[in-house]
Amino acid sequence: MSNQYGHFDDESREYVITRPDTPLPWLNYLGSDEMFGLCTNTAGGYTFWKDAKLRRLTRYRYNNVPMDLGGRYLYVNDGGVVWNPMWKPLKTALDRYECRHGLGYTKITGEKNGVEVEVLYFIVPGENVEIWRTRVTNKSGSKKDIQLFSYQEFCFFEALNDMTNYQRTYSIGEVEIEGSAIYHKTEFRERRSHYTLFACTRAIDGFDTSRDAFCGSVHHGLHEAQVPAKGKATNSKAFGWNPIGSHQVSLSLEPGASETMSFVLSYVDHGDLPKFKAPFVLNKQKGKEILAKYSAPGVVDGAFAQLKADWAGILSNFQADCPDEHARRMLNTWNQYQCMATFNLSRSASMYETGIGRGMGFRDSNQDLLGFVHLVPERARQRILDIAATQLSDGTCYHQYQPLTKKGNADIGGDFYDDHLWLILSTCAYIKETGDKGILKEPVGYADKPGSKEDLLHHLETSIAYTMKKRGPHGLPLIGHADWNDCLNLNCFSTEPNESFQTAGDVKDSKAESVMIAGLFLYASREMAGLYDWMGQKSDAARMREQYAEMLAVVEKEAWDGEWYRRAYDAESRPVGSKENEEGKIFIESQGWCVLGGAGADNGRAKQAMESVHKHLYTKNGIVLQQPAYSTYHLELGEVTSYPPGVKENAGIFCHNNTWIHLGWCLLGEGERALEYYLSICPSAKESQIETYRAEPYVYAQMIAGKDAPVFGEAKNAWLTGTAAWTFVSVSQGILGVQPQYDGLKLDPCVPKAWKSFSISRRFRGATYEISVKNSGVCKGVKKLTVDGKTVAGNVIPLSPAGSTVRVEIEMG
């Protein structure tokens, strides 16, 4: 598959972009440990350590003109012709351009007048070091004298202060230069014990650390920078204003010759070393050690080889060969890769999230774990404990927390009455994946009780109890400020345009109820019952089933609207998502979660609700959130009605909740529908409509404009979305049917009848299961299961010893 801007290279696990002027900046992420970078196809973006708000190393200006200006730039001056191999910021026409986004790296190649510059960007696994491996080649027939200039603008670490408090920041910038290394040391003299290193692994012929000097004046921009235009650095030393890092490298290359060097960007934690070796002179010991290490022959190439090997190992935990090329490509590579990004960053730093307003979401991170837990289970374990520590003792949670401090962030609001239930889903998924029930006894405590030592299981029980306690007139769970749909604000009543919908209003004594939370509770309480069964705690399991039955009875009595499940009841106990409403008659979320929670399973309502989704909400580009779209603002409903019809939560295609319907079709055994719906939001399947879709065709977007919008099919907010994790669940566990259980792997595929065969390789608790499936023409049903040549009753593969390879054959019928 290809489009006019690029194509997939499935063998290399890369997306290859051949035109720089993509409809939107097409992003990749660098780093998977503690240091991260955003890198677009024109090298735009920035780098940070752990926290994009509190430890940002380099600057980036959102919503700039043109979009995506500022990043990891190289300038080339070849006999007075000046250009960037990444096209921006000069946008000089190139003879050839190529960007290869890979797993944790981006390689950009530009060629002009016989000079080729290839730059490989990646962050070294396990280290706080970003590499720009740069190779300059003379492909012409004559000698070339070339001036190469690097460019990176430093951020003063705390991003919000850096971009707003200019009365201070214009006066505090400090740098030092020694050899080929530039040290950004703003505030190091007082309260900081870290600095930023930007260095070159070869000798340089000049430098600049003042942005004004590099550009020429305050009236010049990066697209007309005077230092590369003149071909000579000014050796400027910044004092205040805007420090940058720029190296000049002079190259003389014979025909066919090339030279390779690296630029090294590092977050240097000074630790307990003496801060200065002389007054105002930085102790550069650690920075010098980093530069020396990556200047040694072979070290950079070795680090890149390790990065590729790490990803090959991670992805080998789940690989599949199935008839659909989009499902195969996304499942095996890009979907799992995106799950790593959402695990690392939640919704904090992307082309749409500035890294300032949002940290790690309680609800978000718990859902992200569902698609990540099989990749690196030990990291999932720690994340669960970190999340639980931000829960309050009454059962509510900090809606978000900062990754650097791991402390809850009260500024963005709380009292989202679904948050706590997601902790049950992530914990049970982790234990099923690993068998590690010891996590339940880990002391976590509550955020509002310093020093408390309650264990994780106590948190899960607190979550169940809170929902059962906080119910409204119909017996359904109260919604608080909102449930999963942050924009359904039934207690907000906001008339002030400058206030947040998520923090306005008062949830005390509210009667507004959520059917979606009720469905989620059904799912969560059933998970708790299964967990207690496995642990041998039969009375606790029975107690959970009693609460499940109580809530199920309420849902069937109070939430059914005749053809679908209602969405909620507002603060006046009026139905939302009902035929009684003029607009917003049917919502997607309550259909998905009621069906997944088991509602309607015995009375035909589940099937009827799903058919109503197909009739009223499904489109070729995915399922719209509700219909009809809201045409006017409703005070009693909040932000959901504030968007124009067809976008975001007002009848946009919110891809995240589409996946719950995908799983619903799998539950009902509708394999054709499950795959059709899956492909409707699959980015790989959007290449033929890329001018409309616009977003990256290799990762899922949060939102696609719905049928009520004039831009139907346009995607926004790719990368950091719960769509990634839930899509992986829907394909791996729903369609392919490989479902981790406490005592083995359950196999329950739901595929199109035309799929005659497919195979899966799944690493589970240290053993590798090679699964081959033959299908006689059904969507669902396992007729025969054979494990290492022996027939096994049922459809659960028993556990095998770690290190073993198990051959599994399934006959569907």
Image: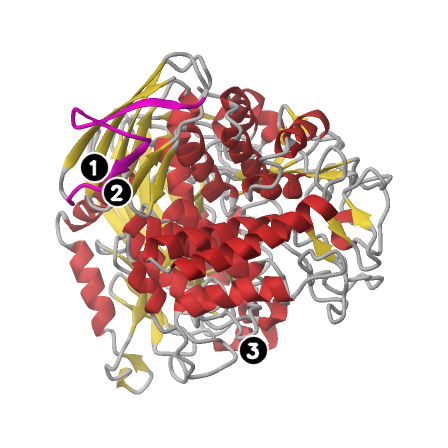
Kindly indicate the quadrant of the structure image that contains residue 585.
top right
At a point 32% along the width and 46% down the height, the residue shown is 374
Comparing 717 with 408, the one in front is: 408
Binning the other alpha carbons within 10 Å of mark 2 as few (below 14), some (14 to 19) or many (20 upward) gives many
Disc 3 marks a residue whose amino acid type is Arg
Q: Position of residue 442 (x, y in %)?
A: 34, 70
Quadrant hosting residue 541: bottom left
Which residue carries the number 2 mark? Answer: 764
Mark 2 or mark 3: which comes first in sequence?
Answer: 3
Q: Amino acid at mark 2?
A: Phe
Q: Is residue 576 left or right of residue 589?
A: right
Q: Which mark is residue 768?
A: 1
Residue at mark 2 to residue at mark 1: CA–CA distance: 6 Å
Total numbered labels: 3
Query: Secondary structure under badge 1?
Result: strand
Region of the chain picked out in magenta, as a range: 780-802
Q: Position of residue 489 (x, y in %)?
A: 74, 57
